[in-house]
Image: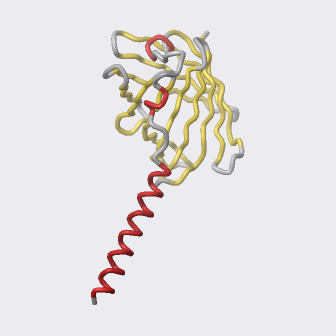
Amino acid sequence: MMIRQWLNTAGVLLAAMATAFALGGCAGVDPQAYATEKPQLDLQRYFNGTLVGHGMFQSRGGKVERRFVVTIDAQWKGNVGVLDERFEWSDGEKQRRVWTITKVDANTYTGTADDVVGTAQGKAYGNALYWTYTLALPVQGRTWHVQFDDWMYLIDDQVMLNTAVMSKWGIRLGQVTLSFTRK
């Protein structure tokens, strides 16, 4: 009887360790890892005025499915910024998203938009911003709630690179790659 209990306990412990190891591998990079990177990202300064972005969406297999150009008109009043994004997709579709972003403290941002479910959460350190949110995405007459894990890296005063992994139920659906340039 004791051996059976030990084997059950050992099996549970091994399963727990395997789960912890697997989840630890998915934890990703802590935004604080970029705290000393330069140039320092100041969202209120970078996302102010007009910016143009060029990007693409790739399926999880890596195929480029769609390309786009986005023009952003951004303005801040104190700790609240409005980013008016106008997308033109390679298939002719036009889209608009208006973000309201709030600087909560030195490193924390929140954001809302009409097609964002709940509130986006962001952490900025050094030259990087990690931004997570759920987007209500229309797909073939239905609306899917998909998660975005979004990283932005300031390269210099004019250019920022952005990569975002899109997933649903923890399954990776694809990736958006984008380059912003200040006008």
Q: How is the image coloured?
A: secondary structure
In percent of width and height, residue 110 lies at: 36, 28
Q: Is residue 126 above or below residue 49?
A: below
Q: Is residue 74 above or below residue 60?
A: above
- Asked whether 63 or 157 is in front, the reply is 157
Image side of residue 83 versus residue 67, left or right: left
- Asked whether 122 or 90 is in front, the reply is 122
Please name the residue shown 43% across and 41% down the image: 134
Image side of residue 118 versus residue 43, left or right: left
In percent of width and height, residue 170 lies at: 48, 53
Locate residue 15: give its quadrant. bottom left
In percent of width and height, residue 131 lies at: 45, 32
Please name the residue shown 45% across and 57% down the image: 21
- Asked whether 18 or 181 is in front, the reply is 18
The mark tally for this picture is 0
Please name the residue shown 56% across and 20% down the image: 154
Locate residue 123: give its quadrant. top left
For the N terminus, give its image quadrant. bottom left
Residue most toward the bottom?
1
Q: Is residue 172 above or below residue 38?
A: below
Please name the residue shown 56% across and 29% down the image: 95
